[in-house]
Amino acid sequence: MTKKRQDCSQAGAEDLSLGAAFGQLFPDGEQVSSAEDISFEPESPTGQGETLNLAGRRIRLGIQRVGRAGKTVTVVCGLPDGDAGQKAAKLLKKQLGCGASFQDGELILQGDQRERLRAELKALGASDVK
């Protein structure tokens, strides 16, 4: 080996022990012995324990390609206006894993998400989804 490589390997061996690395990551000395010791409680779908009430709403799904540089978007009409619509948009965007925006009372999702969106809306309590 060259002198440069010998110097690096010798210096690194002293400084990077596994115990020292974990000591830096967990300064309090907390250790988890197994996966069973880790407790995890999932968040509610809407965030802070709020519920999204879509019962009795007439929700319509459609797709558009015109005026969007050939990209397909899914347009959702019939969601609540204002803050409730923003929360619904954020929730659906997260559950579907796609980009979205909420403008003028319409939710616009990137891509053709109609089938997946229909299932998600029915799971949230919407009965009239077409």
Image (tube, rainbow, N blue to C red):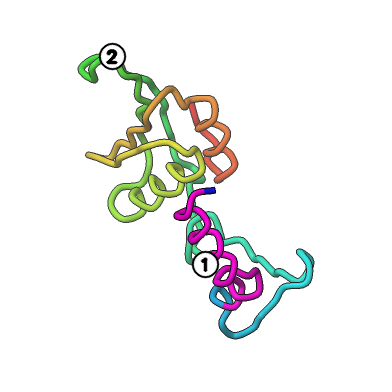
In the picture as drawn, the residue positioned furthest to the bottom comes out as 28
User: Can residue 33 be found in the magenta stretch?
Assistant: no
Question: Pointer 2: what residue?
Answer: 70
Question: Pointer 1: what residue?
Answer: 11
**Callout 1 crowding tier (Cα within 10 Å): few <14, some 14–19, many ≥20:** few
Mark with earlier residue (2, 1): 1
**Residue at left offset 31%, top offset 55%:** 83
| Residue 113 versus residue 26 in the image, above or below | above
* Residue closer to the observer: 66 or 130: 66
Label 2 – label 1 distance at C-alpha: 57 Å
**Residue at left offset 58%, top offset 71%:** 14
| Residue 68 versus residue 28 in the image, above or below | above
Secondary structure predominantly adopted by residues drawn in magenta: helix
Residue range in magenta is 2-23
Q: Quadrant of residue 39?
A: bottom right
**Residue at left offset 76%, top offset 71%:** 37
